[in-house]
Image: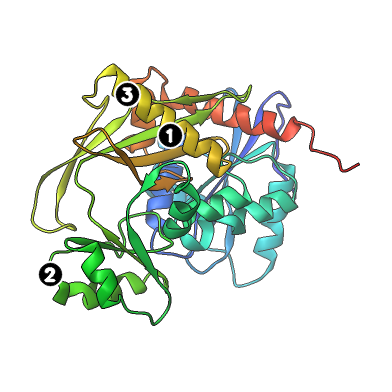
Amino acid sequence: MDAIRNDLPWLTRVVVLFGGQNAEHAVSVSSAATVVRGLDRSRYTVTPIRITPHGRWSVGHDIPAHLVDEISLHFMTPEPELSSAHFFEAMKVLRAADVVVPVLHGPATRHSIVQSILEYVRVPYVGCGVLAATVAMDRGLTKSVMSEVVAVTDGVTLEDGERLSAADQRRLGLPLFVKPARGGSGFGVSRVLDAGALPEAVAAARRFDRRVLVEAAVPGREVNVGVLEMPDGRLLAAPPLEVRVTGGRGYRRALTEHVVPADLDAATTARVQGRAIQVFRTLGGAGLLRVDFFLGADGELTLNEVKAAPRLTAMSQFPRMWEAAGLPYGEMLDLLIRTARRRSARPSPVAP
């Protein structure tokens, strides 16, 4: 395939890029299946490209939207033969696209690597650019950058081979949360209730990243907000969503419930939304962002995490927040695509 075929020139040529060489490959496939299924075929031609667990780029074909699921998406993007030709074929297809929708999760493919490739082939793409994606991928770096505009959880980043000092352990107290510094999901995340369990938790996190973030627990409600950039550059915040722990023993086994809209008064809702937009602007975000906070009993907002590439399954937090705002899934995709194309059409600054 030399390029995306489009016999109907009024249709927008969309590439959905997903997969990756990391533990979140299946998560990415799940999100991508929902995106491919959700794109209106009367408006778009859709070409899926999967980065396989072996690092090969598989250019797929489309099927009727109602037949798309995670299993069929694998069949649409089979494992290529062991040759570098698959990568060059994918580059040709990317160059011919009108817009790329990256649906990638995990440190190997969600930060600036993919964005850099898309910038190189000069194709519009949905979501944050190289710098913002890189910062958002690193939990510790995100908080260093954001600490000037919002309170952040207290924590320490341990480089490869480092251990938490006794002084830091006393300062952070218990419980502690131990996470891979660069990771997007719950893989390698532990809640530590006893200091004796800390080495095991750090070792578990290091299986996903050499750098590990150890954070103090923050009392309060977990409230998350989705931010969308409109084609004209305006930023809108969705109704906040609250994550409630409803049962289970231990962090990994805890059951959660998503309540959207969150039960907040109007003033608190506006403040949380305003702070999320402020984080988006400070990060230099583009397209979409999910900002996760802890809301204390005193009303204090503390930044937990920033998701530059939030999950996009129908039941994921970001689409559910916008559904609660009256924006259906397909229309949300339309907005993301229009915004990406409009951003690419804006003139770049020219040095004198």
Amino acid beneath label 3: Thr
Specify which label sits upstream in the sequence, 1 or 3. 3
Specify which label sits upstream in the sequence, 3 or 2. 2
Of the 4 image quadrants, the one containing the C terminus is top right
Most foreground residue, 341 or 68: 341
**Label 3 with label 2: CB-CB less than 8 Å:** no
Q: Please give left or right for residue 77 compared with residue 158 in the image.
A: right
Most foreground residue, 88 or 324: 324
In the rendered image, residue 106, in percent from the top left (x then y), is placed at 44, 58
In the rendered image, residue 208, in percent from the top left (x then y), is placed at 38, 69
Mark number, residue 269: 3
Amino acid beneath label 2: Asp
Amino acid beneath label 1: Ala
Q: Secondary structure at mark 3?
A: helix
- Asked if residue 128 can be seen in this view, the reply is yes
**Rendered view: 271 above or below 195:** above
Q: Which residue is mark 1?
A: 276
**Label 1 with label 2: CB-CB less than 8 Å:** no
In the rendered image, residue 66, in percent from the top left (x then y), is placed at 42, 32
Quadrant of the rendered image containing residue 223: top left
Q: Residue at x 59, y 56 (%)?
A: 112
